[in-house]
Amino acid sequence: MEHTQLPRVQRLREAGHKLTHARLTVLDVLEHSSGHLTSTEILDRVNQVDASIGRASVFRCLDLFTRMSFVRPTYIDSSVTPAYVLLPDGHHHHIICTRCGVVIEFEDCGLGDMAHMLEDRLGVKLAGHLLEFYGLCPACAAAPAADSEDD
Amino acid sequence: MEHTQLPRVQRLREAGHKLTHARLTVLDVLEHSSGHLTSTEILDRVNQVDASIGRASVFRCLDLFTRMSFVRPTYIDSSVTPAYVLLPDGHHHHIICTRCGVVIEFEDCGLGDMAHMLEDRLGVKLAGHLLEFYGLCPACAAAPAADSEDD
DNA sequence: TTAGATGCAAATAGTTTGCATTTGT
DNA sequence: ACAAATGCAAACTATTTGCATCTAA
């Protein structure tokens, strides 16, 4: 299992954190994910890769990564467990299919402008944003409806 | 304890839900809050008002209210428990101050256009979206830095 | 070498469920 | 009156902690 040496790894090191196997593995799992995983899913995938990594360590990683802004726990639906959204350096956001769960990423978002307008109008100083659309992916949109929709 | 007869109560009734004491109390607590409370805080306040209301009912209310879009569970910081943010009637989004945690709501978002463009371009069918900006509220932006920005 | 990080498993929290009873309509 | 909702308490799930050991630097 090779751990892609992305900037995040550098950031970890520069912040004085050891580049341990557990951390690299969790990071790897996150970076190879759709961008949205619950703690349970992460736990699961990490253990698939290396069953010797303890649950506690995974949570500790998640906590560290949240603190380092690698990731942000979010509530997508009313589920009990938060989804950890990997905060990308670049600006790509996603569309989550509410039926099959597929995540479609897109980069172009006009939010830079919007952010500036908000800063201007509200006096805030914005640093980042999270944009997610919910709906049906092309496949599910084409498939015959199975349940009621909500707007 | 009088329960302010806001539209939400009507909405409950119209959706065919009974206006029970538990529901009205939880709603009341939410509506008299700063706008974001954790389940534990809600539980707590509800019991302060009426200790006979069970925890389960509070969770059931929270669930119902989430489903009715009265409230949205959100992660403000990396805390374990979600904060239930009371959603105003209109379609709106928010800016979360990463320093003091205040939530500033705004309504105007050009996402309708963006959504249409995405539907067109990607073949998806969008139903909703979540937009959150992170940054500093006017007060925090103005205040002298108190601690390091990054750990 | 040495402090920081880990894994384990037990302890805690947070949330849900089943069911008899109560309550809103 | 009747179905929906409740309260209780037990069942569950998710997360954290203490501590001896291990490992990255």
Image (cartoon, coloured by chain):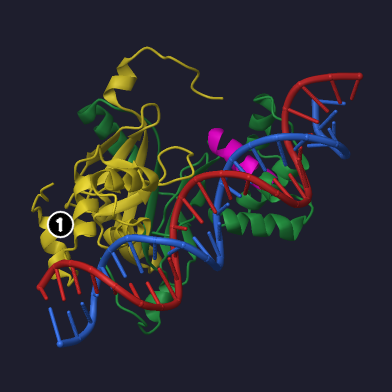
Chain colours: A green, B yellow, C red, D blue
Picture quarter with the C terminus of chain A: bottom left
Picture coordinates of residue B143 (x, y %)? Answer: 33, 14
The image quadrant of residue A8 is top right
Q: Is residue A42 left or right of residue A82?
A: right
User: Which residue does the numbered mark 1 point to in the structure image?
Assistant: B8
Residue most extreme to the left: B5
Seen at 67% across and 46% down, the residue is: A56
Q: Is residue A50 above or below residue B29?
A: below
Picture coordinates of residue B133 (x, y %)? Answer: 35, 39
Q: Which residues are magenta?
A: A57-68
Picture coordinates of residue A116 (x, y %)? Answer: 29, 32
Magenta region includes residue A65: yes
Decide whether the magenta segment is chiefly helix, strand or loop.
helix
Q: How busy is the neighbourhood of tag 1: few (under 14 within 10 Å), some, or many (20 plus)?
A: some
Seen at 19% across and 48% down, the residue is: B28
Exactly how many numbered labels are in the figure? 1
Seen at 10% across and 62% down, the residue is: B10
Q: Is residue A98 left or right of residue B6?
A: right
Under mark 1, the amino acid is Arg
* Residue A49 visible in this rendered orientation of the protein: yes
**In terms of secondary structure, where does tag 1 sit?**
helix
